[in-house]
Structure formats: C-alpha cells, structure tokens
Amino acid sequence: MNDISFSIILPTYNRVHLIDKAIQSVIDQDYKNWELIIIDNYSNDNTEEVIKNFSDERISYNKFKNDGIIAKSRNYGIEKAKGNYIAFLDSDDWWYSKKLKLVFECIQNNSPNFIYHNMHLKYQDSNFKKKIKYTRKLYDPYSDLINLGPAFTTSSVVLNKEIFYKINLFNEDKKYLAWEDFDAWIRFAKLSKSFHFIEEFMGCNLIGAHNTLSTLIKKKNIISFKKKYLNNKKITNLPFWCKWALMTLFYDQRKYKTSFKFCDHLLRNAKISNILKIFYFYLRCFFLRIKLDLIK
C-alpha cells in the first residue's frame, strides 16, 4: 500500500481572502504524495492571481463554469484526478499538517474505502474554535446516515476513487443542490460499508465566510431527501433530525405557527437527551406566535 496517492479537489469562487490559507494547508502536509486540483468557477476577484502565486508543480488550476452547481466542479476535478484516493477541501476551510499522514496510516492499517475525521468549527470573526457537534462514528453507515442524519463535513472526507466511480460521482441535478454531498455519501454507504472514523481533529471548518447554501444538508431540500430515501413517509414518521430540520426551516421563513406545531410534536415524543434543546426552541416559537397574534 506504499503507492497511496491523494487527489485533493478544491472548488472555489471569489475566495481571494481565504483560498491562500486552504492551499497553504495542503502544501504544509507531512505526507507529500498528493496533487491539488483547483476548480475555479470564473472568479471575478483576484482569486486567480492568489492561486498562481503558488509555484508548486503538484497544484493545477482549472477554470470551469459550473452554472452554480458545485457538484459539477467536483466531478470535473475528479475526472482529472490521478490519485487512487480522493480528498475534498472547500476553499474556506483548511487542514492541519498531520491530516494526510494519518489518513495514509489508516489506509495502510485498515484499508477502508471511506475515511472521515473530526473538524474544528471556527466563526469568521472569532478566534474561538469548537468541535463540530454532529461528527460521529457510523456503525451501520447507510442506515445511520438516513436515520440519524449527516455525520461529518465534506472537507473531512477521503474516499476510494474506484468505488466512487461505481456510484457515478456527485449527482449534478439541481434538485440535489446543497445536499449533493450527503446524497453521495448515502449512495457510497449502500455500496460499501467500509467506513473509518478518525477521532483526531485534522482541520477547521470556517463559518460565516459566505452565505453558504448548507451546513451539510440544506433544510429546504429535506422534502427531496424524504421522497428519495424515506419512501415519502408522513411527517410524523420521519427521523428526529428531519423533523428538527423542517421545524427550523419554517422558523427561518418566519412561519412560526407551523414551526410551533413541529416543535410541539417533537416535544411530545422527545428522548430525555433532547428535551431541553426542543423546549428552548418551543419557547421561542411560542412567544413569537403570541407577538404575531398581538400585532394582528
């Protein structure tokens, strides 16, 4: 397994103030057998100039029009990849120098097809970093992803390129916009259960750098997910994480009465570990609902 090489896929658009840190974090890796494939959706700032300041021959810069669909950029990069493992890095995230070395050792020792790890979460205007809460070990990857929801961020993922081609890469249909990665992980897990979670923190996910379409799965696309993977179940029969996503979606849309109904249902059927979290949201919805009624 000494011939392990990594192709790192980094899509970008107008990240002049961030992308240098992402690129430098790859160059600083302790493990050196990698290539970095940057796919630029025709940025109109100085992103190209920043990228071209890096003279490492392992870095390739590609302009590609993705029509606002990041799956197209990632697939374009994968098609150019020479490595036998694909790693993903978003242009507003960065890795710690030990990442690829530890992943390499993991592959040597365990031969998994899919590796992911803990990431820190950092808000753009703060120096404080914390653990991404939803990152967790998957015991039955396919079932756990569907029933328990997203378990890791895309910038932590390294996977076997050959297996990924068997599931036809990321879905480029617009209806998968902002959850194309989560959909791909589910399809990958259906084909291969060979997932490995590394508990080490090996990178940082920046929040607030842009108006991101999603964290891992866009709330507004939960209906599409429900139709594809849950046989269009009734709302009351959905997994907890789906109902929570819908509840917060309606809240964000200021549909407080609908959000309140979801919250009430969750509270009546909540596990003890979730009661405080739901009750806090319940109070927010309750008082906003009263406020709206008073305005009327």
Image (cartoon, helix red, strand yellow):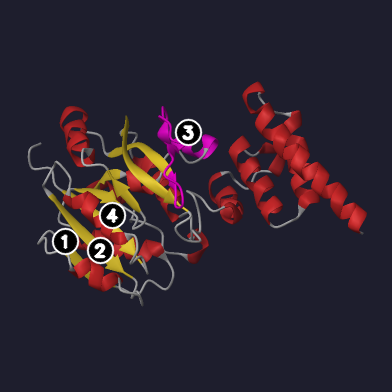
Judge by depth and name the residue closer to the eye, 151 or 222: 151
> In the rendered structure, are the residues bearing label 1 and label 4 in contact, judged by CB atoms less than 8 Å apart?
no
Q: Residue at x 61, y 53 (%)?
A: 223
Q: Residue at x 21, y 28 (%)?
A: 110
Compared with 196, 155 (above or below) is below
Using the image, tell me which numbered label, if any, was put on residue 38. Answer: 2
Q: Taking 34 as reference, is 9 left or right?
A: right
Instruction: Please report whichever mark, 2 or 1, sits nearer to the chain's N-terminal start.
Output: 2
Using the image, tell me which numbered label, if any, was put on residue 22. Answer: 4
Instruction: Please report whichever mark, 1 or 4, sits nearer to the chain's N-terminal start.
Output: 4
Instruction: Please report whichever mark, 2 or 3, sits nearer to the chain's N-terminal start.
Output: 2
Q: Distance between the residues labelled 2 and 1?
A: 7 Å
Q: Taking 54 as reference, is 77 left or right?
A: right
Q: Write down the residue under mark 1.
A: 59
**Of discs 1 and 3, which sits in the foreground?**
1
Badge 2: few (under 14), some or many (20 or more) residues near its Cα, within 10 Å? many
Residue type of the residue flagged with mark 3: Asp
Using the image, tell me which numbered label, if any, was put on residue 144. Answer: 3
> In the rendered structure, are the residues bearing label 2 and label 1 in contact, judged by CB atoms less than 8 Å apart?
yes
**Of discs 1 and 4, which sits in the foreground?**
4
Asked if the stretch drawn in magenta spans residue 151, the answer is: no
Instruction: Please report whichever mark, 4 or 3, sits nearer to the chain's N-terminal start.
Output: 4
Q: Position of residue 46 (x, y in %)?
A: 30, 74
Instruction: Please report whichever mark, 4 or 2, sits nearer to the chain's N-terminal start.
Output: 4
